[in-house]
Image (cartoon, rainbow, N blue to C red):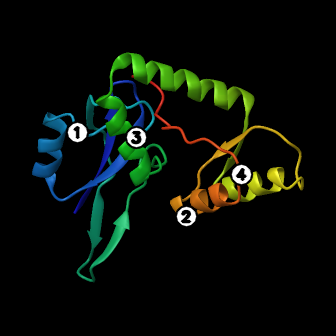
């Protein structure tokens, strides 16, 4: 396995693992690698710090890179970036407008969505718009409890 630091044409940097350099080159040529921030498929390898072995003991010393490493996109983020690249432009733009409105008018609660939705539903917390992530199991449990919520494809910003 090989880890590459990548940069999209808009300047976003991210890291991704590949089986080998040929696998990276094949995926890059077919535009299968997308920026997790903006979905851009025009990516190139960025400068990386080498991993240098230390005197025969097999201990590796990592030389710090110029900038701190970008977080590795989750499988869900990579999936959404791939989905965004293959959908019609008008649909992608409409979903991005919905995302902007949700972000502007609702509170982000992250992975505590199900917990906070229950608190609001049962009057334990102030009634307000929230957004975040939840597992399939949590979503099913919320629906069974009669808690109303909607699910949206959360596309990366940009092209």
In terms of depth relative to the viewer, which is nearer, 90 or 66? 90
The disc label shown at residue 80, or none? 3
Q: Is residue 65 above or below residue 29?
A: below
Name the mark nearer the viewer: 2 or 3.
2
Q: Does label 4 or label 1 sit earlier along the sequence?
A: 1
For label 2, the residue is 137
Are dots 2 and 1 in contact, CB under 8 Å?
Answer: no
Instruction: Report crowding for label 4: few under 14, some 14 to 19, many 20 or more residues within 10 A (C-alpha).
Output: some
- Of labels 3 and 1, earlier in sequence is 1
- Counting from the top left corner in percent of width and height, residue 143 is at 63, 55
Element class at badge 2: helix
Q: State how far apart marks 4 and 2 are (Cα).
A: 14 Å
The residue sitting at 55% across, 64% down in the picture is 137
Residue drawn at 20 percent across, 34 percent down: 31
Q: Are marks 4 and 2 in contact (CB under 8 Å)?
A: no
Instruction: Tell me which corner region of the image, top left, top right, bottom left or bottom right, holds residue 107.
Output: top right
In the image shown, does 100 or 87 lie closer to the viewer?
Answer: 87
Give the number of the mark in front: 3 or 1. 3
Asked if residue 62 lies left or right of residue 139, the reply is left
In the picture of the structure, the residue carrying the numbered disc 1 is 32
Question: Who comes first in sequence, dot 2 or dot 1?
Answer: 1
Q: Which residue is mark 4?
A: 147
Q: CA distance from mark 4 to mark 3?
A: 26 Å
Mark 2, other Cα within 10 Å: few <14 / some 14–19 / many ≥20: few
């Amino acid at each position: 396995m090989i880890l590459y630091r990548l940069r999209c044409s808009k300047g976003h940097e991210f890291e991704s693992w590949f089986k080998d350099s040929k696998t990276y080159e094949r995926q890059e040529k077919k535009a299968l690698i997308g920026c997790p921030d903006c979905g851009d498929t025009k990516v190139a390898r960025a400068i990386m710090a080498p991993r240098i072995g230390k005197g025969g003991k097999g201990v590796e010393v990592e030389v710090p890179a110029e900038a701190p490493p970008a977080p590795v996109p989750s499988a869900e983020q990579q999936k959404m970036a791939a989905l965004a690249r293959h959908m019609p432009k008008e649909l992608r733009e409409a979903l991005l407008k919905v995302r902007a409105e949700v972000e502007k008018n609702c509170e982000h609660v992250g992975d505590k969505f199900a917990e906070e939705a229950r608190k609001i539903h049962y009057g334990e917390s102030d009634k307000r718009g929230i957004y975040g992530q939840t597992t399939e199991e949590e979503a099913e449990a919320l629906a069974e409890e009669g808690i109303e919520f909607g699910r949206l494809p959360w596309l990366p910003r940009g092209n």
